[in-house]
Image (tube, rainbow, N blue to C red):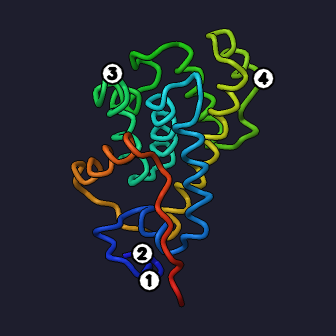
Amino acid sequence: MAHIDLGVDETAFPGIQGLLRYRPETAQPLMMLAEVLLRGPSTLSPGERELIAAYVSELNECDYCAASHAAFAAAQLPQGVRLVDEVRADLETAPITAKLRSLLRIAAAVREDGRNVTAWLVADARAEGATDREVHDTVLIAAAFSMFNRYVDGLATLKPESPEAYLHGVNRIVRDGYLMPETPARGD
């Protein structure tokens, strides 16, 4: 049970879903940000960007966001769940490109403290082929998901235990993205 009354059935709207319905006026800009970061034009695939979100959420121990974004990443990466699980288990041995590994290292540094992103980490990413835009977007995804993780966990939203519970939104996210139809604000 969330710390506050979200005015929705939390089993139907777990994690951030209930929070978005509670405050639609804040939901819209948050979901616009997620849409641009995870699905907008980029040289990183949507699956790679979802993997960054899932990895940061895993490091932040936000079970809801880690599980949901892992499912979204797996649905959009050719190697699927196996690859996502390998990255979450051990970044250094996961079968990903050196460029993606270097970007995930930057993401990990951001989630600890933005000042931990060193010139060396950026130079390493560039040496592996990352562009300035990819470095920028990785930092912003990691920062945004650290905020999303704290939002979800700070209000103690429901976290489904079953991995299958996170699969229901996959087709909608992959097909339609993060923008939600507008709903009226909840009156208090």
**Residue beneath disc 2:** 2
Whether tag 4 and tag 2 are in contact, CB under 8 A, the answer is: no
- Which residue is drawn at the image coordinates 21% and 49% (left, top)? 164
Q: Which badge, 3 or 4, comes first in the chain's sequence? A: 3
Q: Is residue 176 above or below residue 152?
A: above
Quadrant containing the N terminus in the rendered view: bottom left
Q: Which badge, 2 or 3, comes first in the chain's sequence? A: 2
Which amino acid, by three-letter code, is at mark 4?
Answer: Ala
**Residue beneath disc 1:** 5
Whether tag 2 and tag 1 are in contact, CB under 8 A, the answer is: yes
Q: Position of residue 161 (x, y in %)?
A: 25, 57
Q: Which badge, 1 or 3, comes first in the chain's sequence? A: 1
Q: Could you tell me how far apart the alpha carbons at marks 4 and 2 are, in whole angstroms?
A: 40 Å
Q: Residues within 10 Å of mark 2 (few under 14, many from 20)?
A: some
Q: Which mark is residue 119?
A: 4
**Residue beneath disc 3:** 78
Whether tag 4 and tag 1 are in contact, CB under 8 A, the answer is: no
Secondary structure beneath label 4: helix
40 or 73: which is nearer to us? 40
- Which residue is drawn at the image coordinates 50% and 66% (left, top)? 182
